[in-house]
């Protein structure tokens, strides 16, 4: 197991409400962040992700728990005495200062000798690919270069990023996602990244921590969080989902059959090591892209759902099929744009038979509910 750069133990924070009482922003959070890891804190507004970031940086005073960075207890240390640096949405560059002065600001405040200060500034800029740009002003840099200047001021141990890409347009944002991921690997330091954007979290991270109501609902690799969400909240929040709550009515060596509460029959492959017993309440998850348009060939080997089509939406690379099963359950299917002829038939008939692989269906135990 890799050594942790950050360890949180039972970290708790409450904020007062205007009408009286308090609200729990963090509920006894335990978290370990490995060295050289890119960890993303993901969740809706008000879930606690920014408060958790501030707990690490020292910008909030905790009500309980312990924060350790690089093996040292920093719970009582102010922000300027913690070996972290934070990058905000606007990169927090001083517009009246040169690139070199922005990067060297903290060294100037600390009274570092000029020769040492210039050496360290030069090394930091070289590390992020901006060698020789010390004399430029922030307004002379592209958005990507400004991001690199902000990163050049980072601690060599830990960088905290509070939604730094949210103000960018879509194309630049996507480019910067890859840029940040590449830089993190090149710099070899730990990043803790806050976002509410699921695609951003899945694209960039080694692990994703999904938060809701002050608690970590699941923490795992992006693929595991997406393909095997730990509860219904994670399934709904991370990516589009079709959720079928119901009861297992039959189980054998190959298949679990679920009778949903709406009346649909969902089939899931029996997993090795067991699975839900007959009569157990579970929720079946089918991601929209796991559907295909049924034909005679795949109909023999796949499970199927018949839907009445309400809307077909073209998104460029895909078609979104919005409809309802015969018992009335809303369903979303995403079909590649290459299937033009099949989509035309569906638009004409206003009905579709959707096939899915039972092995791709993820079953969520009713006990695995969001806190």
Image: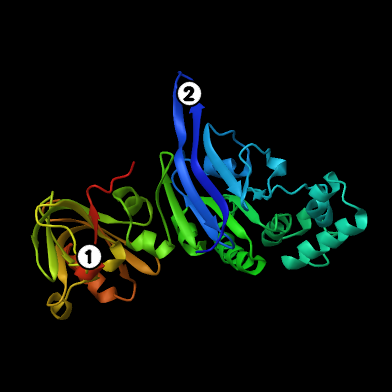
Q: Which mark is residue 171?
A: none
Q: Residues within 10 Å of mark 1 (few under 14, many from 20)?
A: some
Compare marks 1 and 2 and give the one earlier in the sequence.
2
Q: Residues within 10 Å of mark 2 (few under 14, many from 20)?
A: few
Instruction: Give the CA distance from mark 1 to mark 2.
Output: 51 Å
Q: Quadrant of residue 79?
A: top right
Q: Position of residue 353 (x, y in %)?
A: 16, 67
**Closer to us: 306 or 62:** 62
In percent of the image, x 47 and y 35: which residue is there?
25
Q: Which mark is residue 347?
A: 1
Give the labeled residue for mark 2.
17
Q: Specify the farthest residue to the bottom.
A: 297
Locate residue 101 relative to residue 205 in the image: left or right.
Answer: right
Question: How many numbered markers are drawn?
Answer: 2
Q: Position of residue 197 (x, y in %)?
A: 47, 53
Name above or below for residue 368 compared with residue 39: above
């Amino acid at each position: 197991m890799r050594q942790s750069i950050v360890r949180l133990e039972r970290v708790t924070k409450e904020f007062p409400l205007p009408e009286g009482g308090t609200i729990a922003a963090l509920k006894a959070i335990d978290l370990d962040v490995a060295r050289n890891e890119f960890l993303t804190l993901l969740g809706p507004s008000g879930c606690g992700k920014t408060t958790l970031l501030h707990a690490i940086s020292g910008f909030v005073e905790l009500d309980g728990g312990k924060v350790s960075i690089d093996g040292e207890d920093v719970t009582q240390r102010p922000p300027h005495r913690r070996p972290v640096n934070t990058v905000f949405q606007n990169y927090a560059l001083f517009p009246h200062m040169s690139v070199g002065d922005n990067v060297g600001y903290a060294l100037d405040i600390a009274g570092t000798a000029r020769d040492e200060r210039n050496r360290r500034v030069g090394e930091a800029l070289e590390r992020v690919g901006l060698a020789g740009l010390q004399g430029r002003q922030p307004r002379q840099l592209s958005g990507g270069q400004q991001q690199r200047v902000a990163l050049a001021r980072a601690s060599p141990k830990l960088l905290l990023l509070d939604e730094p890409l949210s103000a960018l347009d879509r194309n630049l944002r996507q480019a910067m996602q890859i840029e940040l991921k590449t830089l993190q690997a090149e710099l070899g330091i730990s990043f803790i990244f806050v976002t509410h954007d699921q695609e951003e979290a899945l694209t960039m991270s080694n692990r994703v921590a999904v938060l809701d109501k002050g608690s970590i609902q699941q923490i795992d690799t992006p693929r595991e969080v997406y393909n095997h969400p730990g509860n219904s909240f994670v399934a709904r929040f991370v990516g589009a989902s079709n959720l079928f709550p119901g009861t297992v009515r039959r189980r054998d060596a190959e298949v679990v059959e679920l009778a949903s509460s709406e009346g649909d029959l969902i089939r899931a492959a029996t997993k090795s090591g067991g699975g839900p017993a007959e009569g157990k309440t579970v929720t079946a998850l089918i991601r929209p892209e796991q559907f295909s348009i049924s034909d005679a060939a795949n109909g023999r080997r796949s499970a199927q759902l018949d839907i009445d089509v309400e809307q077909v939406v073209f998104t460029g690379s895909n078609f979104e099929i919005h409809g309802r099963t015969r018992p009335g359950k809303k369903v979303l299917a995403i079909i590649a744009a290459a299937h033009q002829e099949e989509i035309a038939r569906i638009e004409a008939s206003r009905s579709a038979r959707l096939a899915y692989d039972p092995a791709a269906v993820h079953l969520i135990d009713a006990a695995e509910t969001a806190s």
